[in-house]
Image (cartoon, helix red, strand yellow):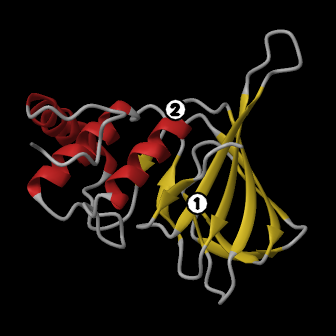
Amino acid sequence: MIELVEDPTLRMRYRFRTIAATAPGGRDVLEVEQWIDPGGGVTPHRHPSMEERFEVLDGTVEFLAGRRWTAASAGERVVIAAGVRHAFRNRSDAVAHVICHADPGLTLQPFLEDAAALGRAGLTTRRAMPRSLDALLQAAVLAEQHRAMVTLLFPPLPPPALQRLLLPVLARWGRRRGHRPGQLGDRPR
């Protein structure tokens, strides 16, 4: 049985599976099975070179693409093209079950695993913002490690151009304090 990754901040659970490319020269696709609790979801972001194809298996999920929110229910699909600002949320009173195919998968799985670890350690707020300077440094290490895969776009974060300047500096500081991808969320000793 594949282990579920719990993210208490985003009120979600994940299960990951890589689907090998079938065509010569094709890319592997990451399948992310998600259970989104009432009130759960992700904040606005974009993937510069990753398309996400969502299929709602159960419940209703609202998807943001650009500036427009659209609800999708069981049996419906939503495609988010690479580079499009997007988010999703469950505003119902029931758990929603969704499958996402990320093409290419890039570093989405380790990013989500590290972000969930920060949440499980109590280092982030409900809006996924760091609760302390140390949490900020851990989040900077995470964001810098995955900068080619995702750009975070929700307030109160600085605009992407400023993030590109600040994150490397904060991530270096975080690495000097011993924070490493795959080990985020661990409390300093």
Query: Can you give x and y, in whole percent of width and height, for residue 123 in the image?
Result: 24, 60
Which quarter of the figure has residue 161? top left
Which quarter of the figure has residue 124? bottom left
Query: Can you give x and y, in whole percent of width and height, for residue 129 in the image?
Result: 28, 63
Q: What label sits on residue 107 in the rendered view? A: 2
Picture residue at 74% right of the left edge, 62% below the top? 98
For the C terminus, give its image quadrant: top left
Secondary structure of the residue carrying tag 1 is strand
Query: Can you give x and y, in whole percent of width and height, for residue 38 in the image?
Result: 59, 82
Q: Is residue 25 above or below residue 7?
A: above
Verify CB contact (< 8 Å) between mark 2 and mark 1: no
Type of amino acid under label 1: Arg
Secondary structure of the residue carrying tag 2 is loop
Picture residue at 13% right of the left edge, 61% below the top? 132
For disc 1, the marked residue is: 13
User: Quick one: label 1, few (<14), some, or many (20+) residues within 10 Å?
Assistant: some
Picture residue at 20% right of the left edge, 32% below the top? 168
In-front residue for pair 3/160: 3
Q: Is residue 171 above or below residue 119?
A: above
Relative to 123, 30 lies left or right: right
User: Quick one: label 2, few (<14), some, or many (20+) residues within 10 Å?
Assistant: some
